[in-house]
Image: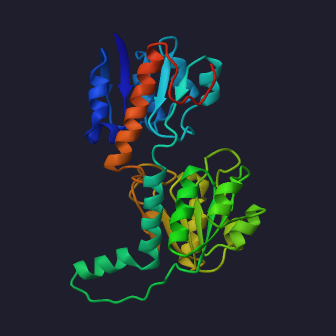
Amino acid sequence: MNKVLLTTTSYQDTPGKHHELLESQDYEIVRERGPLNEEQMLELAGDFDAFLCGDDAITAEVLKKSLPKLRLISKYGIGLDKIDLDFATQNKIPVTFCPGVNHTTVAEHTFALLLAISRNLCEEVNHTRKGEWTRLTGNEIMGKTLSVIGFGRIGKEVALRARAFQMDVKAYDPYWDSDFAKAHQITRASSLEEVLQDADVLSLHLNLSENTHKLINSASLKMIRDGAILLNCARGELVDTQSIVEALEVGKLKGYGSDVLDIEPPPPDHPLLHAPGAVITPHIGSRTYESVVRQATMATQNLINVLNGEPALAQANEV
């Protein structure tokens, strides 16, 4: 009997066909409430044939302890930065993931953050809940320039919504879909500096890597127009937290709408939780009933396929 560690809470908390699919297999399932840090993973590692994981810290040390029994890491979602992919590949541990299942949901959440900041929605709701009839003046987004860094599936979906709101869209990505851009009137930025300088709204949709860690910092923020809005539904570590706080405090940024933080869950005194103009949600960008079922079903099918010696629907490494 294969023993599987299931840690993703979205998977566990959301009803759907993924539960029946997993239960149809003769697996021993151990359920934990992730994301788990390295210390927690080390306590559990070593007794499982597979991880069905979210954003848990699957480091080289965790993988060392997991060998030789671990046969598979099935990632629920698309971000692989919490997994030591090089170590997994070197030790012939397949890592599967779920591309193409959450781009619509994350794009919708990105726009929810943008509209909330533009129209001061969170602040206004708080006023009316306290019985105050405080009428703040917001901003339209029509005619503004949305700059997108990372023009993959999610970036494209955000661009489509921006065009529907009659925004101008400029995007920066070394891999460029010219047909899509032409069809939807998306301008290609020739450099990171250009996409920053032209932004009324800047939206991040790129992977976390050594090259993108703290990509948005005090230096890059100086290039952005005063009063711009920054959106982050990718990874918290793409920005330098203190630089964002300072930009909000002096009004360089009108707002920071983010679904992710550099520490998750954050401590109560995390500076972005109390910064002016910051609208922070608890990493729920892909957490809809529709998207969770798509992701969970694909992650489960990847799990079943690989443990049965069959090809995964999507695999991130070659082993």
**Scheme by which the image is coloured:** rainbow
Which image quarter is the C terminus in? top right
In this view of the protein, which residue sits in the foreground, 216 or 305?
A: 305
In this view of the protein, which residue sits in the foreground, 297 or 60?
A: 297
Q: Which residue is drawn at 55% across and 37% down?
A: 80
Q: Can residue 40 be seen in this view?
A: no
Q: In this view, does 146 lie above or below 77?
A: below
Q: In this view, does 281 lie above or below 53?
A: below
Where residue 263 sits: x, y (%)?
Answer: 48, 50
Q: Is residue 139 visible?
A: yes
Q: Which residue is drawn at 45% across and 47% down?
A: 102
Q: Residue at x 52, y 20 (%)?
A: 311
Where residue 236 sits: x, y (%)?
Answer: 53, 53
Q: Is 172 situated left or right of 56 in this image?
A: right
Which image quarter is the N terminus in? top left
> How many tags in the picture?
0
Where residue 233 sits: x, y (%)?
Answer: 50, 56
Q: Is 311 situated left or right of 22 in this image?
A: right
In this view of the protein, which residue sits in the foreground, 190 or 90?
A: 190
Q: In this view, does 92 lie above or below 291?
A: above
Q: Residue furthest left?
A: 131
Q: Residue furthest right?
A: 190
Q: Is residue 4 above or below residue 7?
A: above
Where residue 266 sits: x, y (%)?
Answer: 42, 53
